[in-house]
Image: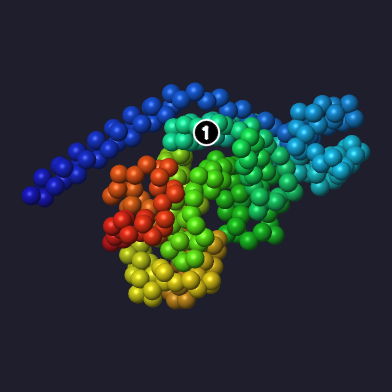
Amino acid sequence: MKKVILVLFLLTMIVSCKNDNQLEQEIEKIPMDVVVERFDKLFSQVNDKNLPKLKQDYPFMFSKKYADSFWIAKTQDTLQIKLFEEVSKAFPNIDGQQKEINSLFKHIKFYFPVFYPPRIITTTSFVDYRNKIIVTDTIALISIDTYLGSNHEFYQGIQKYIREDFNKTNIVVDLATEYAKIYIYQGQNKTLLDEMIYFGKQLYFKDLVIPFKTEAERIGYTNEQLDWAHVNESYIWRYFVERELLFSTDSKLPGRFINPAPFTKFYLEEIDSQSPGRLGQYMGWQIVRAYMKNNDVSLKDMLITSSEDIFNYSKFKPSK
């Protein structure tokens, strides 16, 4: 009997992998030609002669309340020059990121046929890491100076758990996150479960649109942190259920289980010191995955389904 079960499992895995490969081949055929515009480089080379042309090409990058002399002076600022230099070292070209963004947009186009790719423009922002990427209908701005490497000297005053993903490999992940926010519809988050499902939707969206990234990269964990979450999934779930946290509206819960933090606050010394932060997001991810596995629902429809329905129909059981 065990041999039969093993054979069936292997056959299921083979069929699943074959279907995934066919899907990826279909997506790869979608026409898409993304070009990342290096505004940061163009601005670093600005002078009295070429500034008018740059302003004409990128009017949204120049506030009209400032005279041309302001922009020229800005490029000559010592800190700005240092910023240009460090960005140039880290990004002599952006070919790898451009390829990943192209793939991301193909996947979004597959699941959302009306999607039209925006202009992708890199800029510097004096390390405004709270606004690393800004997406509109027609433009996506990438603050490239927030991706110089987590140990870069510019980030030394920023807490380690925040700057861990300040790497160039995270550009496409952060861009996918911003698009997830656009496509998700969810009413006001009132309970911890609402928060968990909202971020679970984001992470599942990334499962489908950036499958070339690892699970750890999609959630922003190290491999060790993701392993810890997998191993302790049953314990985490039991903790939520036994303390009746899922439907609680306690405003302190997002800070403990959802928001970026060096660890998750179970208030248990032996657990807190070992756990990664945002485990509520991780559990929401597993619930959404279970829902999609056990229901015939499109990505588009799932993203607008209520957290209660996703939870009730997910048949979620934590891994043991």
Rendered image quadrant of residue 116: top right
**Within 10 Å of the Cα at label 1, are there few (<14), some (14-19), or many (20+) other Cα atoms?**
few
Query: Could you tell me residue 217's position as x and y percent?
Result: 48, 47
Q: Identify the residue at horizontal 57%, vertical 50% (top origin).
A: 165
Front in this rendered view, residue 85 or 147? 147
Q: Does residue 108 sit above or below 201 in this rendering?
A: above
Query: Could you tell me residue 106's position as x and y percent?
Result: 48, 31
- Can residue 241 be seen? yes
Q: How is the image coloured?
A: rainbow
User: Which residue is the extreme one toward the left?
Assistant: 1
Query: Total number of numbered labels?
Result: 1
Q: Identify the residue at horizontal 63%, vertical 34% (top origin).
A: 138
Q: Identify the residue at horizontal 30%, vertical 48% (top origin).
A: 295
47 relative to 299 in the view: left or right: right
Front in this rendered view, residue 90 or 162? 162
Rendered image quadrant of residue 212: top left
Q: Secondary structure at mark 1?
A: loop
82 relative to 298 in the view: left or right: right
Quadrant assignment for the C terminus: bottom left
278 relative to 298 in the view: left or right: right
Query: Could you tell me residue 123's position as x and y percent?
Result: 71, 39
- Can residue 216 be seen? no
Front in this rendered view, residue 297 or 176? 297
Query: Could you tell me residue 249's position as x and y percent?
Result: 48, 71
Q: Identify the residue at horizontal 37%, vertical 42% (top origin).
A: 298
- Residue type (three-letter) at the residue carrying disc 1: Phe
Q: Does residue 151 sit above or below 210 in this rendering?
A: below
Q: To which residue does mark 1 refer? A: 115
